Image (tube, helix red, strand yellow):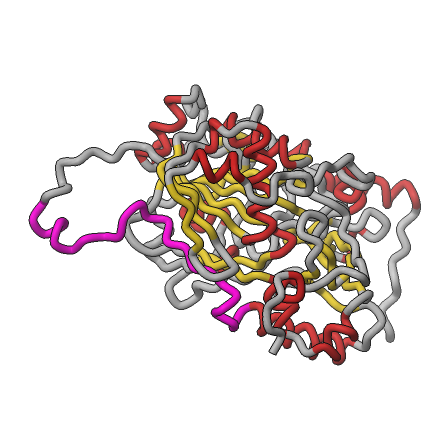
Amino acid sequence: MAPTATVQEPEELQDTIKRLAALKPIGHSRGKHDVVTGFDKEWADKLPETTKQRFAKYGIDISQGYPYAPLNEKIPKFVDEVYAIRKDEFPYVERGKNADPEKKLLFDAAEDVIHLTPYVGTEIVGLQLADLTDQQKDELALLIAERVVVFFKDQDLSPQKQLELGHYWGQVEVHPQATRVGPEFDGVTVIWQEHQRKRWGLPLTFKNSKLGNSQWHSDLVHEFQTAGITHLHLDAIPGIGGETLWSSTYGAYDKLSPALQQFLDGKTAIYRSAHQYLDRENPLKGPKYVEREHPIVRTHPATGWKYLFVNRSMTVRIVGLLPAESDLILNYLYDVIESNRDIQVRWSWQKELGSIKKKEDGATAAEPKVYRGVSALWDNRVANHSVVHSEESIVGRHGTRVTSLADTGYFDANSMSQREALGLSLD
């Protein structure tokens, strides 16, 4: 006999929904352990020494525990609740659009400006992010839009100032589930893989290292207004390893044949969230992602250049194509982004490269570790990124991240690609 479907009455359904809402959040789709909410009392003492110095200097109280995860009752459990958080367009100013193209105020204040590759990645030397004027922030926004990612070493930066910078560049994304510095620091997300692995159950091991942010991805592509400038500040850095790679999706678009570019121009794709939620209309069906539709080729408002807007982790399908067709094209586009080294930059976070000889002769053994952080600021719209994690490189690595949401994304058929605009060869 075939199984009989159970139909719940409205009152029973509402009771089921209330019971589900009282449960702990589902969490990240790859997490293996229960989500811990509130202050984590077991991990505050495990913070790296330089992180403790930074927090003590800027009045961050970790006496109750660290990090802080939103309380259970404040975390959305149903997908409609997440859609409702940011469903309307937020006024956005593209700060780099009206900046000085020569960036004189920014460059003149720096000791040096180092381009790390011909078109991707720049390091600004001798300039504190905390001291930037509004005009310099505008010029930095333009530089990030052009160079994809910009780096600053030797930074003395409070979480408060990092958040202030984020608000200047757009609406700061407050993740409903992500751990943060404290309950008063909405938008300052904690980046601490060691904690995430042991407390949240991210199964990151030597043989299984391509997980979490080690996968090529772009942040928050499921948002109505997708991520613009992300600012990651590491206040504790292991002596070796833990590099991050960024790949330019300006460059990826230019790698395509004119015929494939023409095919993709004007098409849209479906993008999903990293976390899962329940469907209120069918709560027993299982977890569901937040999904939104965006152009697959977009035009950057500051540079006017076309860029490819896909990433392997969170692009679901191209609208209007059969699943097999979509998968075939998307996998090719992912490969273009991930395998072409000439459109990428690889960044070592260490302030100086490790020295075996200094370690052997004990020259640095007595030197105390003093907080001085390193910042990377990139434009999520025009980049995919990936962290090179190992079993060892996540130990002692800690940082804070602030992401500013940008425009809703648009495609201008009259816009040019990066290489077209710069008069470079398209062969």
Residue 248 can be seen, yes or no: yes
Q: Count the labels in the image.
A: 0
Residue 178 can be seen, yes or no: no
Quadrant of residue 412 in the image?
bottom right
In the rendering, at what x and y percent does residue 98 appear?
A: 68, 39
Quadrant of residue 170 in the image?
top right
Tell me what residue is drawn at x 82 percent, y 65 percent.
266
| View extreme (right): residue | 9
In the image, taking residue 113 as reference, residue 32 lies left or right, namely right
Asked if the magenta segment contains residue 387, the reply would be no
Tell me what residue is drawn at x 76 percent, y 71 percent.
264
In the rendering, at what x and y percent does residue 361 appear?
A: 7, 49
In the image, taking residue 101 as reference, residue 21 lies left or right, namely right
In the rendering, at what x and y percent does residue 62 appear?
A: 43, 25
Q: Which residues are magenta?
A: 338-362
Tell me what residue is drawn at x 70 percent, y 61 percent.
306
Q: What is the quadrant of the C terminus in the image?
A: bottom right
Tell me what residue is drawn at x 46 percent, y 51 percent.
122
- Can you say whether 104 is above or below 285 in the image? above
- Can you say whether 125 is above or below 245 in the image? above
Q: What is the quadrant of the N terminus in the image?
A: bottom right
| View extreme (top): residue | 59
In the image, taking residue 114 as reference, residue 274 lies left or right, namely right
Nearer to the camera, 299 or 159:
299
Nearer to the camera, 51 or 415:
415
Nearer to the camera, 80 or 35:
80
